[in-house]
Every structure is written in C-alpha cells, then in structure tokens.
Image: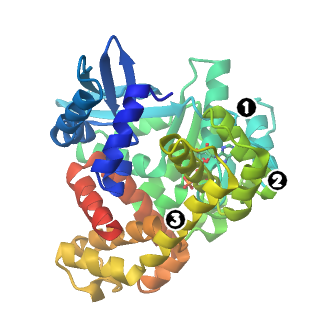
Amino acid sequence: MIFPIWKKCLIQLQIKLSPVEFSLWILPLKVTIKNNIIYIYTPNLFIFRWIKKKYVNIFKKILYKICSNNPPKIIINIEKKKLEKKKCIYKKKNIQIYLHSEINKKYQFHNFIQGQSNQLAYYSSYKFTKNLKNFYNPLFLYGNTGLGKTHLLHAIGNKFLIKNKKKKVIYIHSENFIQNMVNSLKNNSIDKFKNYYRSIDVLLLDDIQFFSNKKKSQEELFNTFNTLFNKQQKIVLTADCYPEYISGITEQLKSRFKWGLTISINPPELKTRIKILLHKAYENKILLSYEVAKYIAKKIFSNVRELEGILKKIQILSILNKEKITINLVKKILNKIKKKKKNINIIYIQKIVAKYFNIRISDMISQKRSQSIVHPRQIAMTLAKKLTHYSFSEIGTAFGKKDHTTVLYAYKKINQLKKKKTEIYSDFIYLFNQLNA
Ligand SMILES: Nc1ncnc2c1ncn2[C@@H]1O[C@H](COP(=O)(O)OP(=O)(O)OP(=O)(O)O)[C@@H](O)[C@H]1O
C-alpha cells in the first residue's frame, strides 16, 4: 500500500531527481505512516546513511510544501530481515565464526507455479521431504539462472522444518560454504567447521558450480558429502548445468552428485509464464488481466526472475502515472527497456570501467588473473549483464572468449560483494549511473 502523502512526495521526487537516482534510491524504500510520523525503512546500513545524508532534507522540504500546516516527522530505520536464522557461534581464542542457515519463508511449495518445464523438479523436491525409504539421495537440481532452483531448495527446507522444528536443516550458498571454510582455516577452527557441517540433518547446497577449480573446498565437500550420505542424512544440490558438464570439479565429486536423482528445470513455457505472472500479480495486489499477462509472457521468455522484474516496473509506473495496467502501458515500458539496453554496448562498458579503475581496455579481454585486473573485469561483466540484453555466454565471448560460468560467477560474486562492502557498492552504483545517464 502506498500512503497518499508519500505518493504525493514520490511524484515531487520524480520531478526533482534523475530517473536513475529516483528508481535506485527512492522507489525501493519501504514506508509506513503512523500518528503523522513517516517511518522509512532501508535494507542496510549503507543505504540508511546515504538516504539520511542525501535525501532527508529534500523529503522535509517537499513534505512542508505538501502539508504546510502540519508536516509529518520523518524517522529512518534499518529494516529487519524476515529470515529464520539458526546461528551457531564457536569461540576459540577470542575469534568467533558464525555459521548460519537462512531458510527463507517466502519460498514455499504452494507458491511455486508448476508447468511442464518444472513439474518433475517440483514433484521430486516435494517427494524428497516425505522421508521415504529408498528415495534418492542426493537430489540434484540443475538449470539456467532464475528458473526456481533456489526457491525449491528453500521450499524443501521449510517443509522439513514444519514437520520437525528441531531438525538441523541448513541452506547455504556454495560461495558462503567456501568462505566459511577459508575463515575457519584462518582462525584455526577447521575442526569445528567440519563437525558443524557433518552433523546436519538436511543440507541444501546452492550453486555448486562455485566450487569449480577450488581443490581444497572440493575435498572438504567430498568428505562432508560422504559422512552425511553414510549416515543417510539428506542432501540437495543445485547447479547451473548437468553435473558432468561443470568444469573444474573432480571426477569423484561429480560421480557422487550423480548417485541420486538428477533433474533438470527448464524455462517455463508460455502457459506457465502466464500462470506465474497472474500468481505474482495476485500476491503483490497488482490488477493484471489475463490478456496483459499473456502479452508480457509472449515478450519475456528467458526466466522467472525477469518476469518478476518487469511486473514490478509495471506496478510502479501504473501507480505513479495513475494509469491502469493495459497492453499499451506494458508496450511503452518494454520499448523503453529495449531501447535502453540497445544503446549501451559491451565495448562502451569495458571502456568506462577500465578508465575508472585505471587499467587498459585490453586488460578487460586478457587472460590476466591479478586481482587489480580481475575485479574491474568482474564489475564490467556484471554491468554488461544488467545493462544489455546479452546472455552470459555472449558476454563471456566479448570478454576474450571466457566461459559463461566465468561470467555467471563474476555476476554473483559482485552482487554479493555489493551487499557486504560499501566501497564496492559505491563503485558499482557510480559506474551504473554513469553508463545509464
Ligand atoms: N515456478 C515458479 N513459481 C513461482 N516463482 C518462481 C518460479 N520459478 C522461479 N520463481 C521465482 O523467480 C525468482 C528467481 O528464482 P530462483 O532464485 O529460485 O532462481 P534460481 O534458479 O535459483 O536462479 P540462480 O541460478 O540465478 O540462483 C524467485 O523470486 C522465485 O520465487
């Protein structure tokens, strides 16, 4: 729900700020109003500070204009995440390692829309939670980005926890598993790390292609896998491709992955895309007709994440412009996105990013592996994915014939780092704005 005062404020802000600034900083804010106080919630500390520094005075001025007799007060808070965290803290020589599981309640079986493309993955995941004897272990789900693998992992986790809250059900992204291991090695607490992961009832490990070329981490995963498997504990794994084709993973680990049931999850067909759009619209209280959903579904076919993104944009624009969601409005939005994406090409992105980090453009497409080159290259790859219509493999080709998994890795890494490190976040936003201006 958008409160009328905040809606008026948004209209003024849209006029005052650049479109990028507006959609980047202002639109994602969560706002509630109580007793003439506007509570603004930001997702993290960095954004909290940024909004406070840059925008609070503008908010105040606008509010004073809108309701001069009694302008509301503004309070900014950091939003508390609704994640169910199981934290396990180990102390050793005053060093603490935090190992935690984050099962997201948002992702359940009942809100996973089934169709031909994902029915088998859905069914196998659901059956997996039934604790049937002789059911395959591990369950291995694979498919392209944004098709619902992570959603199903959390749905499995949630189902197990509903049945038994005390079960140690751990969802972890492979990158975090590796990071935890590295930290434990540094802190001399690798035994605690091992014990922790080997005492799990259900291990949900996402995106195992991140283990690629990490020998030591693969060894640890192999041992963890064997221990859990021998104790008949449950293991679910996901990856972006069939186990055999994950490069840089040892044969023994690949063979373990294939011991159980390996299921692909494919891009949703038209009928399923329409169902997903209508369901997401319903969940988010968006008035979307079947005809409009069908129109969008015909235009966007790559993955569900993209469908969600478009729907969000449509919702925001229809609210701001007070326009009904019609095919015409959707057409306008899709054309704008297409134009924007067409105008920015990868060479331009490489040039701007290279200049910013003070490296040569040729370094972008080289095979050099030093951190001073790899980091800008990964940022440029991520920007290319966000700002152009090119696929991961097309971007890889443009960066000196790199594999699509290298680009996917860069994309995920930068997106994670952006959340953790403010300097990387501000570099990224600066470049994003510059390219988008
Ligand atoms: N069949 C579906 N029904 C409802 N929502 C879906 C479905 N498939 C995907 N989604 C939604 O699409 C978004 C992206 O899905 P998810 O993160 O699970 O993809 P993924 O396959 O794990 O991608 P990646 O490999 O990039 O991590 C999520 O918000 C998820 O809820």
- Pick the residue in front: 143 or 42: 42
Q: List x then y, in percent, for residue 202.
A: 60, 34
Name the amino acid type tagged 3: Ile
Q: Report whether residue 261 is seen.
A: no
| Disc 2 CB within 8 Å of nearest ligand 1 atom | no
Q: Pointers 2 and 3 in contact (CB under 8 A)?
A: no
Q: Quadrant of residue 54?
A: top left
Q: Quadrant of residue 240?
A: bottom right
The residue under label 3 is 337
- Pick the residue in front: 277 or 246: 277
Q: Is residue 150 left or right of residue 289?
A: left
The residue under label 2 is 271
- The residue depicted at 29 percent of the width and 29 percent of the height is 66
Which of the two discs, 2 and 1, labels the residue nearer the N terminus? 1
State the mark number for residue 110. Answer: 1
Mark 2 or mark 1, which is nearer to you?
Answer: 2
Above or below: residue 207 compared with residue 43:
below
- Pick the residue in front: 324 or 189: 324
Query: Element at badge 3?
Result: helix
